[in-house]
Image (spheres, rainbow, N blue to C red):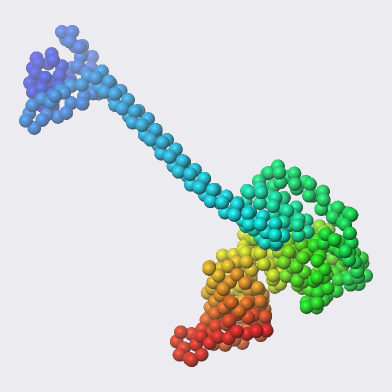
Amino acid sequence: MMVNCSRCGNAFDEIYGVCPLCGTPYISPMMPNEQPVNNVPPVMSNAQVVSNTPPLQPNGQQPDTAFVSPEAFAFRQEKTAGKKKKWGKRLAIIAVIAVVMIGMVLALVLILSHQAVSTEAREQLSLGEKYMRDEDFDEAIVAFHKAIDIDPNNTEAYLKLSDAYHAVGNFSEAIRILQLGFERTRSGEIKAKLDELAAQTTLEALTNGQPVKETGACGDNLTYTLYENGVTVIAGEGRLPDTDKNNVPWHNKKIGELFIQEGVSEIGQYAFRDCDTITTIHLPRSVVRIGEWAFNDCDRLTGIEVDPDNNYYSSMDGILYNKERTVLEHYPSGKWGVYVVPMTVTQIQNWAFAGSRYLRYIGVEGGNEAFLGIDGVLFDKEGHTLLCFPQAKTGQDGVYTVPDGVTVIGAHAFYECEALTSVTLPSGVEQVDFHAFERFTADQTIYIEGKTSVPDGWDSRWNYKCRAEIVWQPPQESTSSEAYESYSPYF
């Protein structure tokens, strides 16, 4: 029986089952229960035959492949899947190679960086060792601290820094450095030395067998004993009185570690100011008052330790606070590095940082509602008052410009900042408090924008003991002959 192809219209005998011209299967219009005749297998439906046959070419010729059997199609699919798997493996290999290469590059960069860091740290260690041989222990301490800043995991630096502190009689700081080193490195060598030193640095151990160098009275019913190794003990019942800042009785006594015994109730104003050899001060439970500037400008002082049972004062990391740690009383002048104002602190004494020659950065703990740290400089929370520029901070190439928006320069804000070459005050500064630039030298310059003379809101002692050149820079529209007038006050 002749039928027509449903696709190309070609006439062919139904017995073929598919169109000989285009390969399209022929579907018989038999009834659902009708059986095929002449034992010819029924033709598969379109849903049962998968064809990749392309359409007829424009010239009407039959394409090269008119019909793909299910077996051929399955083979082709399997082959395609195999190719995809091969490409997947290749891509995976390429990805692994890329990761390995990137890792090798990063490792090389880290190795080179570590080598550079190790070289810089080694240079500081060598410098420190030279200072130790020359018995210039203060400079050795600086060099070893720099080595630790460069490489915080350098075991040798902690050991040598501890030796340097021990050499100047700062036994407590020698231990503190070893504790820090062990926390960072977990070095067995540091731990062994720490255990050895800890047993040797109690008051009894420090004074046992030491010759007494000097004794005497010091205030109301108090006496002092100065040992040959610098350890000094103040004992009795009473108070250390206020003293004249220019006549501190301890200035030339070569005190090292100072132990103030139970029974001492007060430490007067200026009591130990400018005592350059004091290293650590131990305060008893009985102290109820510490006067202003009692411990300032003590260049080797690295820690103030307070009896935990004292009801008026406390210490943390060698820094002196009131009992509740809401007031910063004093940051030790010889303490190295970075200080972060705790969240609890709401008040800072205006002399707290004066003379802190190694302080190079001040930050503020998150959540503090009273203070703000900007690029290592301390401000009030609103950023209107500059409270302290760290003494060891150099600014940008020694130049510092006070940010716009600052209206007040606090007392002692730039006290003895010899690392700076110049400071510029913007025209918006309305108030400069007393001693803000104390001990500036003749090699430094203070530029004051938008003004030709000292404003009424500035304290009369704002440049007390300041030898810097003061350069007044009037507003730009001014044509006054006073423009850029300068003078160098000496007090």
Q: Is residue 458 above or below residue 134?
A: below
Residue 79 screen position, x and y as percent? 29, 23
Q: Is residue 407 above or below residue 215?
A: below
Residue 322 screen position, x and y as percent? 76, 65
Residue 184 is at least partly visible in this image: no
| Front in this rendered view, residue 269 or 6 | 269
| Front in this rendered view, residue 165 or 284 | 165
Quarter of the picture holding the N terminus: top left
Residue 171 is at least partly visible in this image: yes
Residue 47 screen position, x and y as percent? 25, 23
- Looking at the image, residue 446 sits to the left or right of residue 293; the answer is left
Q: What residue is rendered at 65% in x and 64% in y? A: 359
Residue 250 figure quarter = bottom right
| Front in this rendered view, residue 301 or 140 | 140
Q: What residue is rendered at 22% in x and 19% in y? A: 69
Q: Is residue 191 above or below residue 241?
A: above
Quarter of the picture holding the C terminus: bottom right
Residue 435 screen position, x and y as percent? 67, 78
- Looking at the image, residue 142 sits to the left or right of residue 483; the answer is right
